Image: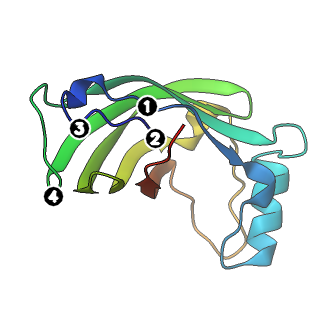
Amino acid sequence: IIVNFTDPSASQIGQIAINARTFVTDNEFRDDSIRGRILRSDEFEFITFEPTALEGLPTEPVAPGATLEFQIIGDLTVKGVTQQITFDTSVTLVDATHIEGTARAQTRYPDFDITIRTPPLVSSVEEGVILEIDFVANAVTE
């Protein structure tokens, strides 16, 4: 993440990669099912998001303490299938060296060629998925 305090619209976000082999929930049986049959993590180790645009960022300078609301548009790749999604994002510029934020998007798992068999004793599994990332970033020197 490169934050431009003078012109926030010139800020940049690099690729985000999540290792599907390390996916965990509160249930080991569910974890094995998600990593194995659903995400096929042995074949597709990483889920990636490649930002292509940041929309709604101001062009005028911002000061620490400000919270910015904007959208991150990009390509999400799951199991080798890529779809464009948009994250609604809120970032607080805590100070000149520290930001905190949340990014949230909605999508559908069938759009990524994912099939989920309905488990026993469950009437159905919704196709909608909410992706949410809470993040903290601290400045580093090059």
Disc 2 and disc 1 in contact, CB within 8 angstroms: yes
**Picture layout, residue 113 above or below residue 41:** above
| C-alpha separation, residue under disc 4 versus residue under disc 2 | 31 Å
- Give whichever of discs 3 and 4 has the lower sequence position: 4
Counting from the top left corner in percent of width and height, residue 95 is at 25, 57
Q: Which residue is mark 2?
A: 107
Disc 4 and disc 2 in contact, CB within 8 angstroms: no
Q: Which residue is mark 4?
A: 65
| C-alpha separation, residue under disc 1 versus residue under disc 4 | 28 Å
Image position of 31 (left or right of 86): right
| C-alpha separation, residue under disc 3 versus residue under disc 2 | 18 Å
- Give whichever of discs 1 and 4 has the lower sequence position: 4
Q: Name the kind of residue labelled 1 in the image.
A: Ile
**Number of the front mark, 3 or 4:** 4
Disc 1 and disc 4 in contact, CB within 8 angstroms: no
**Number of the front mark, 2 or 1:** 1
Counting from the top left corner in percent of width and height, residue 69 is at 19, 44
Disc 3 and disc 4 in contact, CB within 8 angstroms: no
Q: Which residue is mark 1?
A: 85
- Give whichever of discs 3 and 2 has the lower sequence position: 3
Q: Quadrant of residue 44?
A: top right
Mark 3 crowd level (few <14, some 14–19, many ≥20, 10 Å Cα): some
